């Protein structure tokens, strides 16, 4: 079976990693190929992965590129992560579709805060993207993000305790949990990776301090004023901080306890730090679970992230602080939460460590039970059943 892997065209890297993790699970009966921007071709080829020779540029015509990839690679099935164009591509090409779905795109799901938006796709963007698809292709456009992700089988890259399905989907066999889909640090496609030895040396120099890892992911790269204020406060408190947020104006004394790099080896770091501060991005929180690290989740006013952050707080493994843009007490709240969250001997920290350990066990069991080859077979079967049912005459009552 030939599988074409397609990441979201609006945010390729964070949506490429789970697809690469899935492709790593294929056996000799399957052949996978990736549709990615040309700047990533050499990196993937060095790992022995097949790449379709097309520049899948985020600013280009995604649907045209996907159809061209189907013509060149001739896949039996398409696996995508939140690609708007894949809705059209799979219908025009009549290919089965496996979609990666998370909190925020489950049918029947309701955001906790109606004022929040999705991090990747606004309703307006969905409407613009499919504006002419019915006139040109005779395909009814999706009316929202949930319909945009319609697939023959859905993979949820997490665990049931965190990525909570609506009641209507609890017994739906077409939603399959995989556990966290991450890659070894050496396989993450980064142009300027930091040596793990540099991280180890920094942690060793600061072994008597609290070690904190703050990341805001690739979408919020650079962070904002509040993130820099958070870092400066933590440094003032004597913590050593590793971060993907740059602090160009630090004194030399603070530079001894601050480590910056735009791309960081997350597995290596998370095996060493005491506390993780993050925006609860699609794959970021998985590292905190895998390495049993209590977290502080910073809101971004995106319901696909903030709703998961709120869920992690309900489970007792993280503190959720709404975005500074909607929380006038953000700075004070962060300082209060930080002092408690970084105290390794404190009641909250010890309880969070124990509870995140339970989630790690659930993740390990879920990942062990996940069978990607079986998912592909089920998707093909469901697709053929759907096409057969579509040809059946309508019953007249």
Image: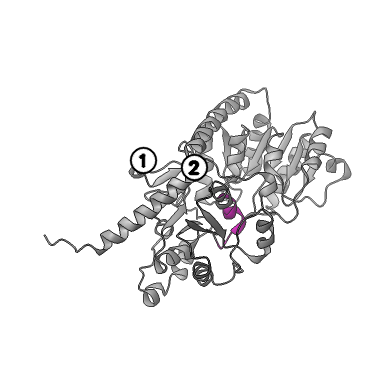
The secondary structure making up most of the magenta span is helix
Q: Which residues are magenta?
A: 9-18
| Gap between marks 2 and 1 measured at Cα | 15 Å
Whole-percent x, y for residue 287 in the image: 61, 39
Quadrant the C terminus occupies: bottom left
Mark 2, residues whose alpha carbon is within 10 Å: few (<14), some, or many (≥20)? many
Residue found farthest to the left:
397
Whole-percent x, y for residue 108 in the image: 37, 49
Residue 209 falls left or right of residue 358 = right
- Which of the two discs, 2 and 1, sits closer to the camera? 2
- Residue at 42 percent across and 68 percent down: it is 93
Task: Give whichever of discs 2 and 1 has the lower sequence position.
Answer: 1
Classify 7 as above or below 64: above
Q: Which mark is residue 136?
A: none
Residue found farthest to the bottom:
136
- Residue at 76 percent across and 43 percent down: it is 232
Residue 14 among magenta residues? yes
Report the residue marked by disc 2.
Answer: 178
Residue 368 falls left or right of residue 382 = right
Q: Please indicate, yes or no, whether residue 345 appears anywhere in the rendered image.
A: yes
Residue found farthest to the right:
252
Report the residue marked by disc 1.
Answer: 170
Q: Please indicate, yes or no, whether residue 112 appears anywhere in the rendered image.
A: no
Whole-percent x, y for residue 252 in the image: 88, 44
Residue 269 occupies which quadrant of the picture?
Answer: top right
Residue 90 among magenta residues? no
Q: In what element is the residue under mark 2?
A: loop
């Amino acid at each position: 079976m030939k599988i074409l892997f397609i990441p979201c065209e609006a945010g390729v890297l964070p949506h490429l990693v789970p697809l690469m993790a899935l492709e790593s699970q294929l056996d000799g009966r399957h052949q996978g190929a990736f549709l990615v921007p040309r700047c990533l071709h050499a990196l993937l080829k060095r790992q022995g992965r097949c790449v379709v020779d097309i520049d899948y540029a985020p600013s280009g015509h995604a649907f045209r590129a996907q159809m061209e990839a189907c013509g060149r690679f001739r896949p039996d099935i398409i696996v995508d992560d939140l690609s708007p164009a894949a809705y059209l591509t799979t219908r025009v090409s009549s290919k089965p579709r496996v979609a990666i779905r998370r909190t925020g795109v489950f049918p029947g799901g309701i955001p906790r805060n109606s004022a929040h938006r999705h991090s990747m796709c606004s309703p307006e963007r969905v409407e613009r993207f499919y504006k002419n698809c019915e006139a040109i292709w005779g395909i009814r456009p999706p009316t929202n993000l949930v319909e945009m992700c319609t697939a023959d089988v859905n993979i949820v890259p997490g665990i049931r305790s965190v990525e909570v399905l609506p009641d209507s989907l609890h017994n739906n066999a077409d939603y399959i949990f995989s556990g966290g889909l991450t890659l070894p640090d050496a396989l993450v496609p980064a142009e300027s990776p930091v040596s793990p030895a540099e991280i180890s040396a920094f942690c060793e120099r600061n072994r008597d301090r609290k070690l904190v890892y703050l990341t805001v992911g690739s979408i919020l790269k650079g962070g904002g004023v509040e993130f820099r204020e958070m870092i400066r406060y933590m440094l003032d408190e004597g913590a050593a901080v590793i971060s993907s947020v740059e602090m160009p104006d630090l004194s030399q004394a603070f530079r001894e306890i601050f480590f910056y790099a735009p791309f960081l080896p997350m597995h290596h770091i998370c095996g060493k730090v005491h506390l993780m501060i993050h925006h609860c991005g699609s794959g970021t929180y998985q590292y905190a679970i895998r390495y049993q690290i209590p977290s502080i989740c910073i809101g971004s006013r995106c319901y696909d992230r903030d709703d998961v952050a709120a869920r992690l707080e309900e489970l007792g493994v993280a503190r959720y602080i709404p975005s500074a843009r909607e929380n006038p007490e953000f700075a004070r709240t962060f300082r209060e939460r930080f002092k408690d969250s970084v105290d390794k001997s404190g009641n909250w920290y010890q309880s969070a460590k124990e509870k995140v350990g339970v989630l790690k066990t659930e993740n390990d069991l879920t990942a062990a039970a996940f069978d990607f080859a079986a998912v592909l077979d089920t998707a093909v079967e469901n697709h053929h059943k759907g096409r057969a049912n579509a040809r059946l005459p309508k019953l007249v009552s």
